[in-house]
Image (cartoon, grey):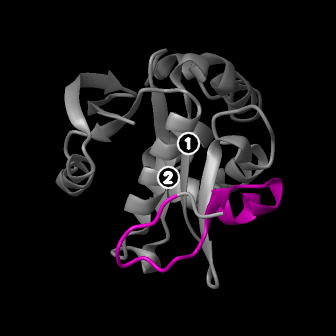
Amino acid sequence: MILATTPGVSAQPIRRATPDDAAAMAPLFVAAMESFACAFVGSEDPMDALPVFQRFASLPDNQYSYENTLVYHDDQGIAGIVAGYDGARLESLREPFFAYLAKEYGFEPSSFGNETAAGEFYIDTVSVASHRRGAGIGKALILAACAVAQQGGHTRAGLLVDAENPVAKRLYASLGFEVMGRKWFAGGEYEHRVRGV
């Protein structure tokens, strides 16, 4: 089922992820959050977090679950992902992930504040495989996430974007995400951007 298409992107499906997609989703999660991935597992190599993201992508009821993820899947495989959920559910979705990291890696979750809250559908992670970038896949995934938000009864979608990332800021601005304020999160400054759905 095609949830969204963008001019220039072939009419391949953006679909809900399944547990079987976890192995393909994990590297995309890690690529999207390199420094966070390092912090999560106490390593200088973000790829050390790969097993963690593969585990949680295959499980229900967490931030990085297949339940909260759409994949762009064509004849070359999974080229991109977008993960999003009701901001009101952040703490309950985050809890199993952080509990596992604390137990297995000694991660201290108090260093991470809340990135979203009730009142918005939060787009947590957008990632496109490096060799597929520039083809509009990211835009199509974001628009698909906004469609899911609308289908779920939300009136707006929100996200955080690194204040020092002009490329990402231009992308989100082109899709109608407006700056609603700035937020310090995990030691960095981010713009909180929101658009109606």
The answer to whether 158 is drawn above or below residue 171 in the figure is above
Which residue does the image show at 62% across and 41% down from the upper left?
A: 41
Q: Quarter holding the C terminus?
A: top left
Query: Circle 2 sits on which residue?
Result: 144
Residue 5, placed above or below residue 50: below
* Mark linked to residue 157: none
Q: Which of the image's four quarters has the N terminus?
A: bottom right
Cα distance, mark 1 to mark 2? 6 Å
Q: Is residue 5 left or right of residue 72?
A: left
Instruction: Assess whether residue 18 is covered by the magenta stretch.
Output: yes
| Relative side of 186 to 24, left or right | left
Q: Toward the viewer: 197 or 159?
A: 197
Q: Position of residue 20 (x, y in %)?
A: 82, 61
Chain part drawn in magenta: 4-25
How packed mark 1 is, by other alpha carbons closer than 10 Å (few <14, some 14-19, many 20 or more), is some
Contact? badges 1 and 2 (CB < 8 Å): yes
Q: Nearer the viewer, residue 46 or 162?
A: 162
Residue 123 x %, y %: 47, 39
Q: Which residue is mark 1?
A: 148
Left or right: residue 12 versus residue 169 is right
Looking at the picture, does residue 162 appear above or below residue 82? above
x and y, in percent, of residue 94 in the image:
64, 26
Percent of width and height locating residue 136:
37, 70
Q: Residue furthest bottom?
A: 75
Q: Which SS class for mark 2?
A: helix
In the image, what residue occupies the spot 42% across and 76% down? 9
In the image shown, does 191 or 39 lie closer to the viewer? 191
